[in-house]
Every structure is written in structure tokens, then in C-alpha cells.
Image: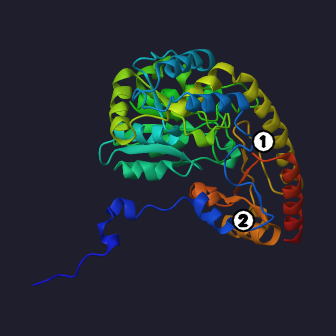
Amino acid sequence: MTTASKSARDFIAPHVRGLPKSGIRDFFDIVAGRKDVISLGIGEPDFQTPWHIREKAIESIERGVTRYTSNLGTPELRRALADYMRTSFRAEYDWKTEILVTVGVSEAFDIAIRAILSPGDEVLYHEPCFVSYAPLIRMAHGVPVAVETFRKDEFRLTVAELEKKVTPKTRALLLSFPNNPTGATLDQADVEALADFAVRHDLLVITDEVYSELTYEGGRATFAAVPRLRDRLIFLNGFSKAWSMTGFRLGYVCAPAPLTDAMMKIHQYCMMCASSTGQIAGLEALKHGDADIAEMRDSYHLRRNFVVASLNEMGLDCFMPRGAFYVFPSIQSTGLTSQEFALRLLNECNVACVPGTAFGACGAGFLRCAYATGMDQLKEAMERMSAFVKRL
């Protein structure tokens, strides 16, 4: 007796088959090939990687420095990262055993989740949030548990909402501030309250602070500087946003030695090491890139003020985000859904933004606009959007 042969789809693991595609990339497939589109969509700096960083990368290739590095990353880069963590985040990490260089923050998060989760473990995370968090938790056979944040709180995460979702199965708390897509930040009181929550429930904390250098008011509040979290904290960061090095795919993770060793084993088998060229570029960024960050941050600051004022003037309620390079205006007054608004804005005005629902169900009624593009284009985009809203 013979049975029907399987189709290719039948060979896909069920937990992968059910994963949604990125809401950001899905939307921008629609944009591909269109002319005269002003994109406020992809979260990528419009600045070129500073020349002195590119020059070091080019020089390394010309000198033939193109071989594997240590799985953990080059000693020079890890020493520089330990210094950076000390001066910028008030945190001490041993460069030999507690810092691991990764292929972007995305890999850092992936290996962190895989190192700590057993099947069925729950991870609390806040929405709206970056699109990869819940899928990566599912791929590690964990259970993502979304905790809603609200416009009335300027999308800051509160302990009250967390207490509604924590269970005996909760293993970790995932945090990402400054936030993508809202631009929300936390102050030190928020950080302390969330740290108390994690300790009270005996949770591991994973904090993604890739936008930390792009904080505009109120100073930098970081979980890395909270002593009582030292043994239960995995700190993620990278070079993509602060130094405009997205294509270099360079990130890092700081954690207690046993956790770093566990993550290194996964990294060792799936990735081997980060690019040697990228690591040399990253070292240059850490040593001589402070002025570059300041220049880009000042430009984003001016753009943010302009975009927020423009959105509020056209009747789209938008709070003033204190970090990252995104605004998250409400479009509820128009009577359109997030998807309808974004599609019509694209089709009728050639302005591309991302529906808030791409970042979680509680993003309904909102739109993500990235101001990581030139001021001339931002002015034109706001004029087109204002005319669109008036027509509605």
C-alpha cells in the first residue's frame, strides 16, 4: 500500500510554518519599484557610515585581515567594549568572559533566548515593539506574552500591567528602551521599579538598548547600571544605529560569565564569529566616534521637533518621543484603520509609513514614521500628509 508523497510544505516544522512574515517588510514589498516615494518607513539612518570608520575597514581588507577571529570577538574590540560599558553605562564587565561580539543585535537576542528558554517558558515583553521579538521567542519554543503599553503613559511600560501577565511559568522580562516603534524612553524611577519587579518574581532581564545613544532629553536610564540586576541581566547593544553601521552587522552582548558561555556555544555552532572587517570598524567607532554620534543625534533632534509639530498641527495626535528616530502618531481621528491610512497615504501621496499594527495588536490606530531621512524630504512628506488629512 502506498501513500501520497509529501509536498515541500509538509517538511516545514509546524512552529515555523505558523510564523507571520515581518509586517514592516510585507508593507514595503508594496513600495518596491515605485517612483517618487518618500520613505518614512525603514528604521535605518540616512547618514553614511563616518569616513574614518569606513577607512579602517578598507585598510583592513587591503592588509589581508580577513580571517576568522575568536568566537567571542577580537580581544581589542572586547576591551574597548568593556571601557565603553564602564564610561557610558556605569557597568563593569570582564572583557575576557562577559562580553560576546555578535552578528548584529538580532543574533545577540536570538542566542540569548535560545540559551535560557526551555519549551513552554514564558517571556514577558511590551508592545508595540520591534517585529522580531515574539517570532524569535516562538522559534526557541518559548511562549511570548505581550504586555500592552498606552499613549496616556507615552508608551512607557508599567509594573501594574506586568503584574497582570506574570505567571509561575514566566522565565524572563524583555525590555527595549528607547523603543522602536514609539520612541518611548524610561526614566530612572521606571528602571528601578521594573528592576524591583524582576527581582520580586525571580526573572531574568534581557534589555535591548541599541538606541541608547539616541536619547534627547532626561539623560540615559539603563538597566546595566542597576547593581541588583547584575546576576540576572543580559544586555544587548550594537553599532547599527548610533554610528550608522547597519550593513556591518555588528552587535554585542554583556552578561555574567555562565550566561555568556552558554550563548557563546550557540554562537560558535551557528555563526562562528562576527566579520573581522566589521570588528575592526567597530573598534574605530568606539575609539574615535563620539563626535559622529553627537552630530547625528543633533540632526535627529531637530527633525524630531519638526515632525512632531507638523503632525500635531495637522490634527494627528503625537507625543514628543525622547529617544530613537521614530514618532508614533495616532490616526484614529481620521476614521481609518492603520492599514487603510498607510495604504492610502502611499497610493495617493507617495509617502510610505508603517501601520502601527505591524508592531503588535495594540498599535492599532497608530502609524510609525521614521525621521531618519533628510529634512528636505521630511518637509515634503509632511506637506503631502497634511494635504491628505485635510482631504479626509
Helix, strand or loop under label 1: loop
Tell me the quarter of the picture where residue 359 sits: bottom right
Q: Are discs 2 and 1 less than 8 Å apart at CB? A: no
How far is disc 2 from disc 1 in space, using C-alphas?
21 Å
299 relative to 11 in the view: left or right: right
Circle 2: is it few (<14), some (14-19), or many (20+) Cα within 10 Å?
many
* Quadrant holding the C terminus: bottom right
Query: Which residue shows up at 40% across the image and 26% down it?
Result: 70
- Residue 162 lies, in percent from the top left, at 50, 41
Q: Nearer the viewer, residue 325 or 120?
A: 325
Q: Please state which amino acid type lies under the numbered disc 1.
A: Met
Residue that label 2 marks: 342
* x and y, in percent, of residue 147 in the image: 52, 47
Residue at screen point 68% across, 20% down: 288
Is residue 190 shown to the viewer in this render? no
Residue 298 image position (x, y, % from top left): 81, 32
